[in-house]
Structure formats: C-alpha cells, structure tokens
Amino acid sequence: MFLYTIFPSNLSEITTSINNPSALIINLNNNLEDNYTPIKKNKNKIINFFERYFCFPSSSNSVYEIAQKIKQAQNDNKITGIILNFNKNFFSNRTTLEYLGKKLKNFKKSGKPIFSVSHFYNQNQYYLASFGNEILLFPHGSVIFEGMSIKKFYFKKFLQLLKIHTHIFKIGRYKTAVEIFKRNQPSKLSKKIDYFWLNFLWKKFLLTISRNRKISQFTLWNSTLKYLKQLKKYGNLTKIAKKNNLIDHVYSEENLKKKFIKIFGKNKNTQNYNFITLENYQIFNKKNDIPHNKIAIIFASGSIDNNFQNKNCMNISKIIQRIREVNNNPHIKAVVLRINTPGGSAFFSEILRKELLNFQKNKKPLIISMGDIAASGGYWMSTAGNYLIANSTTLTGSIGIFSVVNTFEKILEKFGIFQSCLTIKKPYTTNIFQNLNHESKNFLQYSIEKGYLDFIKLVSKARKKTYLQIHKIAQGKIWTGLIAKKIGLIDKIGDFDTAVRKAAKLANLQDYEIDWPTSEKNILEIIFEKFLNTFYTFTHQIFNIKFQKFIQNISFFLTNIVQLFKMCITPQKNLALCLTCSSIQ
C-alpha cells in the first residue's frame, strides 16, 4: 500500500511512457525471487480489470528482471535516478540480495542518484538501501537488525509421547539432520559447526553494509544493553537511527514530495514528480546480429522431490522437459543451471544428474551456478556440470545420506490392536504397523552405505580426486562457497553473471542472447496470487511488527510439524538433504 502523495495510489497517476526525465520507482513489496518471472503489463482483459479496480500489485519480484531494467536505466537518458520503495513484507535470501546490490552499485557509477524510502527498514531492506546515495525515513520510522539464526524443532520426546517408533539410518559424522528425531536439543558438534558458518555469513553481511555506509560494524550491531540506553536517551527509534548515521534524513510525506519534485521535475498533470514504475518500464528489444547463438537458463529450486503441487519442491518433470528442450534446440550453444536447493530425494537427485549427463553428449557446455544453497542432493546434481560456480556465502557440500523409518506398532499396542502379517520371503518392504526386524535394519543400513559410496564415487570422479580425499571433506559437512573453493568442491567464486560469461567462453560465443524459461499460468492462478499478495500487504500495513513475528513463528512451527508427520507416514527413501541449510532465518 503506497503513500498517496509520494507513490502512485491509483491508475490515473501511473505513467506508462517517459516524456520527461524521470525517476525509476522500484517497489520492493514481496519476496525478491531467484527466478525469472518478467514483470509486464498483462494483456488479458480480466487481469487488467482486477489490476485497475482492485489495485492488485505484481505477485513476485524477479531479481533478474529488475537487474535487466536497472542496467538499461543506467544508460537511459530519460531515467535520472532510482527510488527504492520498501514494504514491510519484503524478504530475500543472501545471494539474491548480493546480486541486486551489485547492480545498484553499478548504476550509481553512472552518476545518477539512488534514494531509499520506507517507514521501516529490516536488515534485508537496509542491506539494499546501503548501496544507494541517501537512506530516507519517515517520522516514527525505525531501522531494525535482528541478526541471523538457525531455527530447528527437536521431536524426540514428542515422538515418544505419540508412541511413534523412529528408526534412523545415516552415513556421515556431520550429517546432523537426523538429530531432530533422536535428540531434544542440538549436539555440541552440531552447534559448533553451525555457529562457524553462521558467524561467517553474518560478518560478511555486516561488512558490506559497513563499507557502503562508511560506519563501523559495532554501530550496526549494538548490544541490547547499549540499545536500551540509547532508547532512554533519545526517546524513539527514529532518533537512534539518525544519531548512529544509519539514515541520512527524516522527511514527512509532503517534504519528501517537494524534494523529489526538485530533483526529478514536476508533472503538470499529476502535480507529482516525474516517475515511471518498474512494471511499466519496458526493456528495449535489441536484435542480435547472430540470433542463432543462445545461452539457456534452467532453474532448479526447492526440495528435490517430484511434488509439483508443493511450491517449495522442484517440479522434476518440468526441469527434465526444459533440459530436453534446450538439448534439442540447435540455437542453444550452452546452458547455465541455477541450483537453489538443500537437497532431498537421492533417487530424484540421480535422475536429474543422469539427465544432465545425457545433455552433455551434444558437447554443449553446462555451467552450474549455485544460489543460496546447493547442498547434499543439490551438490549431487552439480557434479554433472563442466564448471561449478558459487557465491562466497553459498552453502554447499553436505555430502551424506540418511533415512528415517517410522513405525506405529506402539500406538496400536496401546489401544489393544495387533497386526499379524504372513508373507512369502520377498525383498524388503516397509510395513509401518510392525517393528523392523534385524534383517530389515541390516538391509536399510546397507542401502545407506551403498548410497553414500556411490555419492563419494561420483563426486571424486567429477572433481578428479581420490575416494579418500572426498571422504575426508564429506561425511555430511556443510561448507561455505569460500571454503568449498579452497578444498576443490567448486571451480570459482562468482555469481550468476560469472556463470553466463563462463558459458559463453566455453562455447566460444562473442554475441549471444539469453534464453529464459517461460512460465505460463492460467487466469485463476494469476488472480489468486494477486489477491493473496494484496491481502498480505494489507495485513502487514495494519498489524505491528511484534504481531507479524508472532504469526511468522507460528507458521514456522506448523510447517515443521506438517513436515514431520509427512516424514512419519511417507514410505522409506534415502535422503540427500541438508535440513540445517533450509532452517536459516
């Protein structure tokens, strides 16, 4: 929900073409997503009706679409600056923030200013704002840093109370994912390892802001005691932010409007400053002299499980279809596979790896671009690439396998129910209503050991190292991208752009186009997404931050409970999954 005098609140104010030098308004209201979903005017009349009369905002913010437009605006004479408008429900992961921050930094080199405007800055919003020229805050606003954390629930006692019998099979000393089932709190080893890389991520995050704003990390991350003293001294959070140089100016809506009119000029029709929103700022279509040279992008995000109905899981079938499409397209000379996953099913990880290996039979370079997380099953997939690139803050490795089998015979016994099962000897199958016998346990343990051996072998072959060299750095241990480079798990530290340049180099391309995947949605899906997004924005405007955090924590707890019960009733399967990687907040 945007301020009427500062930002467009109805369609009559929104500019769809640039007649005068204008500001480019980037409304960061939703999740900043590591995918490609172009923000453009929908040609469907039904969608346009809902957008016009119900003020539905765009349902997602694609970092690549935003980056393209920022790069174009850098050399566009009609764009004289950028305004970042933040909303409370903005969220993004680390590598996506770093990527957009780099684009803002490059834009600022053109000499055009970047202003950030908000009633409230959380640490993700402030990170991006720090790349600009001025950080502006409305009266009674605040800047809040909450740090980083790993939140996990432990279910040992809970499972015992429910009489669920949990059988755990794992390989890897550092594969601590199973601890949530066998302990009521993390082990010392788990806490030591997690703290090491969590501290690294947090320090790098603060260091970037510190350099951008030219203020000390200590100022950014005050102790609770000092913060309380400042609150008593200055009386409100806005003054604390100003005294600590976290912001540049505090403006009322009217004064901020006057400031922008002075900088960007006045629109006589709207009596506002000249601007165009990101949604209406179109990318110029440039025809390539050699249109047959393309680099295809494939996104593999979410847990590795072929449950396309769950937005948090990969759509395995769709990814395979995309791989085969680009493989059969003679115009596509190379591929960048963008991986963002904590892993999942070892079975589907191997299916994807084999599909990628089949792709390479056509001698097209395959570059792996690791996002926030490319761990366990995500790294399993990565071994099919010709060249592996990760950010310094990427979480990868976690080379290990585990399996959890839950049986419910104790619940049945409590209610006086007993099952008799007469079978002819056959291969191992799971019966959730009977305890595992010795033979079944041995079979499962062998299956895990064999899976781990296969994992190590394919990594050692891909990275041209011995079994012992990989086993030493495997065993389920998580590595940051920076350390992964030192120990040989990846080839280079870099981001998505680095991967695209490497793909062009290996394919010997001087001129090329990017072939982005398309995502078609029906009318009802788009309307429903837009309705939910409007509802979330509205509730975030009304309720205070504490209430929002309460709702987020309840949601996080319920999600964990649902995942737990899903694992309890799902038939046994080997998992190459890093639960810790997906628990960062």
Image: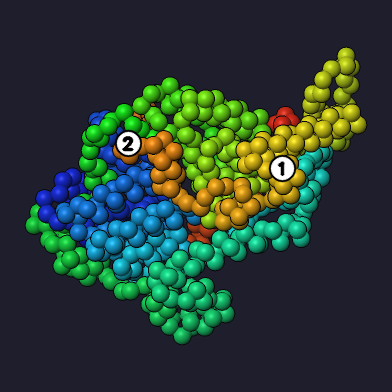
Residue 513 spot, x, y in % from top left: 32, 36
Tag 1 residue: 466
Question: Within 10 angstroms of label 1, few (less than 14), some, or many (20 or more) residues?
Answer: few
* Labels 1 and 2 touching (C-beta < 8 A): no
Q: Quadrant of residue 224?
A: bottom right
Q: Residue at x 51, y 28 (%)?
A: 360
In the foreground, 345 or 159: 345
Q: Which residue occupies the extreme bottom position in the image?
A: 233
- Check disc 2 and give the amino acid type: Glu
Q: Is residue 74 left or right of residue 413?
A: left
Report how far apart the C-alphas of labels 1 and 2 lie in the structure: 39 Å
- Check disc 1 and give the amino acid type: Thr
Image quarter in which the C terminus is found: bottom right
Residue 456 spot, x, y in % from top left: 71, 39
Q: Residue at x 43, y 81 (%)?
A: 235
Tag 2 residue: 513
Q: Which residue occupies the extreme right position in the image?
A: 438
Residue 181 spot, x, y in % from top left: 76, 46
Residue 535 spot, x, y in % from top left: 40, 46
Question: Within 10 angstroms of label 2, few (less than 14), some, or many (20 or more) residues?
Answer: some
